[in-house]
Image (cartoon, rainbow, N blue to C red):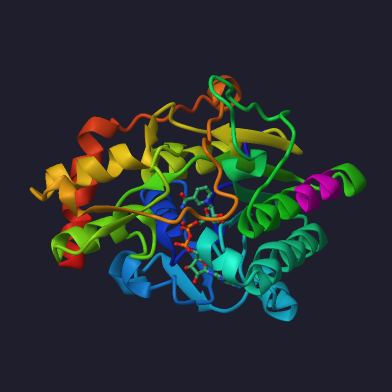
Amino acid sequence: MPRDLSTPLVTGGAGFIGSALVRLLLARPEVERVVVLDKLTYAGSLTRLPENGKHPRLEFIHGDVTDRPLIAEILAKHPISGVFHLAAESHVDRSIENPDDFIATNITGTACLIEACRASGIPLLHCSTDEAYGSAEPPILFTESSPLRPSSPYAASKTSADLLCLAAHTTYGQDVVITRSSNNYGPRQHPEKLIPRMIHCALRDQPLPVYGNGLQVRDWMHADDHSAGLIAAFIRGKSGNVYNLGARCERTNLDLVRRILSILGKPESLIRHVTDRPGHDCRYAIDPTKAGHELGWTARVDFEQAFPETVRLLAADLA
Ligand SMILES: NC(=O)c1ccc[n+]([C@@H]2O[C@H](COP(=O)([O-])OP(=O)(O)OC[C@H]3O[C@@H](n4cnc5c(N)ncnc54)[C@H](O)[C@@H]3O)[C@@H](O)[C@H]2O)c1
C-alpha cells in the first residue's frame, strides 16, 4: 500500500534540501497541506520557503526536533500523514570543531521523532547520507548492505540516527524508511558549503581555498532529484529498508572549482590548495540500483546543464 502523502510534516524545511522538498510537495495534487518544523539555526531561513513561509498551504512551526512536548503537540493538532525528517546539523567542518549540536540534533532529535511517530502510528522517512559508508576505494560502489564506516562526527551522528531508526523497526515493527543520498547541489544552499563558498570567493577575486590536492571525489546530485527520491521512498519504500539515492555523477572537488571559475569567467590562478580536512574521505560512491528497481526513481537532472544554471543562480544571490 502506498503511504499517504496528504499532510506531510517536513523537519528542517527551511534548509537547502528541505525547502526544495517542500516546493515539490506543494506542487503535487494529493498534498493538501505541508507542515514545516524548523529551529531556524544559522543554516535555516524562511526566505527559502515559498512566499517566505506564508504560502496558504504551508504551516511553519518554529521549534526544535529535540522538544518532545512540541512534537507531540504538532502530531496531535495536525492530521500529519507522515514525517520527512531532514532537520540536522549538516556541516562536516563544524562537527570537527564541536560535535555537541550534531549529537543533540542529529541523534537525540531523531530519537525524539522516532518515539513520537511510534506513539502516533505515523510513518517516518529519515533522510541520511552516503557518508555513513565512509570512503570508497575505486571502483567500489557501496550498496545498502555495505559496512557502515563514518569518518567525521557529522557522518557518525547521521549513522547513529540510521541505526536508531532500524532498531525501532526491528524491535517495535515501526514504519520507518531510510534514504542515503550523495552530495547535493542546487539553488539556496548556505554560503558555507563548497559550491557557494567558492562562488563567493571567485566573485570577489579572492583565493578559492581547496582542501589538499582537491582530488576528493563526490557523486553530485541536484536537490530536486534528491527531493523526488525522498518522496518516492516515502510513498513506496519498504518499511525497515534503506535506499541509496545517487546520481552516478562522480566529479573531483577540483573539477567542480575549475568549472565554477570558467562559468564566472575567472582565472584558475585564484585556486589555493590549503591543509586538508582531518579524516577527509577520498571518495563517496553509492549504487542507486535498489531505488531504481523498488521505487521507480532515478536521478534525472542533467549535471552538464544544471550545474552552470546553479552557479549563475547562486552567484546572483551572493553578489
Ligand atoms: N546537503 C547535502 O549534500 C546532503 C547530502 C546527503 C544528505 N543530506 C541530509 O539532508 C538533510 C538536509 O540537509 P541540508 O543540506 O538541507 O542542510 P541545511 O543545513 O541546509 O538545513 C538544515 C535545516 O535544519 C534546521 N535545523 C537544524 N537543527 C534543528 C533542530 N534541532 N530542530 C529543528 N530544525 C533544525 C536548520 O534550521 C535548517 O533549516 C540533512 O539531514 C542532511 O544530513 C544532505
Residue at (62% x, 34% y) in the render? 243
Q: What kind of secondary structure does the magenta stretch mostly adopt?
A: helix
Q: Reply above or below: 246 against 315.
A: above
Residue at (74% x, 33% y) in the render? 147
Residue at (44% x, 26% y) in the render? 248
Residue 175 in the image, given as x and y percentages of width and height: 76, 45
Residue at (65% x, 69% y) in the render? 99
Nearer to me, 68 or 74: 68
Query: Hey, which residue is sitting farthest right in the picture?
Result: 171
Residue 167 drawn in magenta? yes
| Residue 93 seen anywhere in this rendered image of the structure | yes
Q: Reply above or below: 23 against 204.
A: above
Nearer to me, 292 or 80: 292
Query: Hey, which residue is sitting farthest left in the picture?
Result: 265
Displayed quadrant of residue 83: bottom right
Residue 78 in the image, given as x and y percentages of width and height: 61, 69
| Residue 28 seen anywhere in this rendered image of the structure | no
Residue 26 in the image, given as x and y percentages of width and height: 39, 54
Nearer to me, 256 or 270: 270
Q: Is residue 23 left or right of residue 236?
A: left
Displayed quadrant of residue 84: bottom right
Tally the numbered discs: 0
Residue 215 in the image, given as x and y percentages of width and height: 41, 37
Image quadrant where one finds the N terminus:
top right
Residue 196 drawn in magenta? no
Image quadrant where one finds the C terminus:
bottom left
Q: Which residues are magenta?
A: 163-169
